[in-house]
């Protein structure tokens, strides 16, 4: 069973995001698998949550996502600054460097560090993409 909810289409345990058009339905669709989580809270907090409904969870997740995205962006900047050091040092980009790694201990060490930094930036970027789903 499917239902329209804001700009989401709920389908069983999944939802699809996109733009809603009353004539065409959901367009620019991206399917996202959903999971259910259980959170234990004190009775006082439960009473507050009961009176505010689902909204408080959405707002809390959105705020946490915003802060986490900011933190991850700072980490990416730090890694990119280090990557820039290697680009300046070798006067070439990472892929060009990979094609001709210098045959020295320093070249090998730089290859390991540079590869690590490129992979970290990629992983952090993927985390940000997922967190952006919470921001809406």
Image (cartoon, rainbow, N blue to C red):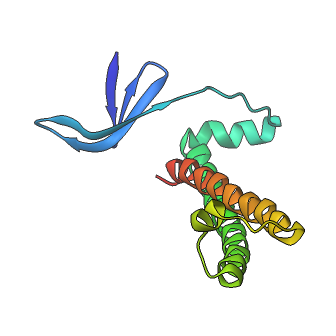
Instruction: Please name the residue shown 72% across and 59% down the image.
Output: 115
Position of 50 relative to 94 (above/below): above
Query: Is residue 18 shown left or right of residue 65?
Result: left
Residue 66: quarter of image: bottom right
Looking at the image, which is closer to me, 68 or 43? 68
Residue 128: quarter of image: bottom right
Instruction: Please name the residue shown 63% across and 51% down the image.
Output: 127
Q: Outermost residue, top direction?
A: 1
Residue 70, percent across and down? 65, 67
Q: Outermost residue, left direction?
A: 23
Looking at the image, which is closer to me, 42 or 69? 69
Looking at the image, which is closer to me, 78 or 57? 78
Q: How many marks?
A: 0
Position of 35 relative to 121 (above/below): above
Query: Is residue 96 shown left or right of residue 48?
Result: left
Q: Outermost residue, front direction?
A: 103
Residue 59, percent across and down? 57, 52
Residue 99, percent across and down? 61, 61
Q: Where the N terminus falls, by quadrant?
A: top left
Residue 53: quarter of image: top right
Residue 92, percent across and down? 60, 76
Instruction: Please name the residue shown 62% across and 26% down the image.
Output: 36
Query: Is residue 112 shown left or right of residue 38?
Result: right
């Amino acid at each position: 069973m499917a239902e329209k909810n804001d700009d989401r289409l709920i389908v069983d345990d999944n939802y699809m995001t996109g733009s809603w058009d009353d004539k065409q339905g959901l367009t620019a669709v991206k399917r996202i698998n959903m999971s259910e989580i259980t959170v234990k809270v004190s009775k006082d907090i439960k009473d507050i949550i009961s009176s505010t409904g689902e909204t408080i969870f959405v707002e809390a997740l959105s705020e946490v996502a915003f802060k986490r995205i900011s933190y991850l962006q700072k980490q990416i900047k730090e890694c990119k600054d280090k990557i820039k050091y290697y680009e300046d040092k070798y006067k070439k980009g990472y892929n060009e460097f990979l094609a001709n790694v210098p045959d020295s201990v320093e070249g090998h060490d730089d290859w390991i560090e540079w590869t690590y930094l490129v992979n970290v930036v990629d992983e952090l970027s993927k985390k940000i993409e997922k967190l952006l789903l919470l921001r809406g």
